[in-house]
Image (spheres, rainbow, N blue to C red):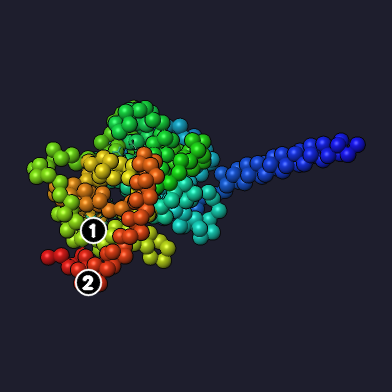
Amino acid sequence: MAVVWVKLLRTAAIVAVLGLLYLLAIQKHAERDSQREAPVELTAACAEKLQAYALSASEVYRSPYLHKTTGRVSELSGYSEADIRAIQRGCNIVDDTQGQLAKQGARERWNATRFSRSTHTSCDHCHQSLGDKQDSAGNRIVGSNGLGASWVMADMYDRFTGLLLPYEMRQMQCFINSSNGFKPNAADDLLRDITAYSRFLSAALDLKIGHRYPEQGMEEIPASATLRRGDDYVRGAHLYREKCAACHGVQGFGTVVDGKVLYPALAGPESFSLDSRMHFGRVNTVMAGFICRNMPLGQEGSLANQDCRDIAYYISTLPRPAGDRQGPLVAAWQQLMMGVMPPLTRYAESLGRSDTPHAIP
Ligand code: HEC
Ligand code: HEC
């Protein structure tokens, strides 16, 4: 008799646990749905960009950018309210990947911190102007890592891996390496929203699927674009202290004030990993191109090609998180160095060999 009771109880317990899991799943789904339905509070930059591109719910979409730059009018199929919320969330994620603005009461799900170990990363740091960098006349900028141009080329050949990668996987690469983070699920709202936003950009800019546009990817500076003096990280270190350290810090650990990232880390635990394409040791042309085109902020284009390669080389010698290709030994070594370097620098400073930007003649 007792045996039957034990069996019954065990079955009841299993049914109860499964039932609870089911209820939990239902509740999570409902939560997610309500987040999808919630109105989106845009960041200032996103509000400006999406308004300039006349994003609104209607049957057809006409791009004001196209009209302004070419005088032509194209009619594309329009967007529903749900589409618009997805595009808005996507833009917010690109602008505010750490959800610094979201924490101030906004309910919607547009902070990506759960996929990022770095507390500095914003997609917008490297995909500048929300993945849509233009000069003052509205011309898109060559090699500015544009997201709209990237979307129309996704599913095409990726020159670094030699594979045909869907857009979601391209985003994952950046979550994993550029923010030293984790891979979001391919069906996660986060990736879908960024895709919706990138796709909207391509419509707003009148980009055609399968075409290669010059703003896609980073402008690269290969060694052949210099006088072939050879890359020199010692010269790079001097240039770095002179031109970059004031913002990005002597160690390259970035500058955070009141919990807001003013200048992102270029090295150390908050930085991109050894596997990022921004890492000179992995791809030695991309970071140099980024620097020459976009830095020092406010004086873009003031550095020579060789300067940019030297600085990129120097930055690559600073400790940073290992990626998934390096294995545990390298990871442990990098971890150790990230801990040891700041005290060493402070010690050097205490000896009067300060590396502050103005100490270099
Ligand atoms: C540290 C700089 C950095 C950050 C931060 C960064 N990316 Fe990237 N991203 C790159 C580089 C470099 C490439 C490769 C560019 C190339 O192909 O020349 C790239 C490529 C991409 C591509 C593929 C582009 C193409 O044309 O093939 C996508 C999509 C992308 N990033 C999305 C994101 C998203 C989403 C985020 C925010 C979670 C992000 N990135 C953050 C540097 C960065
Ligand atoms: C006036 C401050 C300032 C100076 C000087 C400056 N930067 Fe930046 N840097 C920024 C800001 C701000 C960003 C974030 C992107 C943006 O807002 O355009 C950034 C982003 C970057 C990034 C993208 C990296 C990431 O991980 O998100 C790199 C790489 C970089 N800077 C390198 C340099 C180098 C190299 C120099 C020196 C030649 C330099 N910067 C000088 C302010 C500065």
What secondary structure is marked by label 1?
loop
Which residue is tagged 2? 351
Q: Tag 2: residue type?
A: Leu
User: Badge 1: few (under 14), some or many (20 or more) residues near its Cα, within 10 Å?
Assistant: some
Which residue is tagged 1? 244
Mark 2 residue's CB less than 8 Å from ligand 2: no
Closest to the observer: 360 or 47?
A: 360
- Quarter of the image where ligand 1 sits: top left
Answer with left or right where residue 92 lies relative to residue 358.
right
Q: Quadrant of the C terminus?
A: bottom left
Q: Is residue 292 among the parts visible in the rendering?
A: no
Closest to the observer: 205 or 357?
A: 357
Q: Quadrant of the N terminus?
A: top right
Q: In which quarter of the image is residue 6?
A: top right
What secondary structure is marked by label 2?
loop
Q: Residue at x 18, y 51 (%)?
A: 233
Q: Residue at x 23, y 41 (%)?
A: 284
- Estimate the x, y position of residue 342 in percent, counting from the top left: 31, 62
How far apart in space, not on screen, are marks 1 and 2 (Cα)? 23 Å
Q: Quadrant of residue 227?
A: top left
Residue lying at the far right of the rendered structure? 1
Q: Tag 1: residue type?
A: Cys
- Estimate the x, y position of residue 108 in percent, counting from the top left: 54, 50
Closest to the observer: 42 or 246?
A: 246
Q: Which residue is drawn at 41% across and 31% down?
A: 166
**Which one is earlier in the sequence, the residue at label 1 or at label 2?**
1
Q: Is residue 210 among the parts visible in the rendering?
A: yes
- Estimate the x, y position of residue 156 in percent, counting from the top left: 35, 27
- Estimate the x, y position of residue 304 in percent, counting from the top left: 14, 49
Q: How many marks?
A: 2
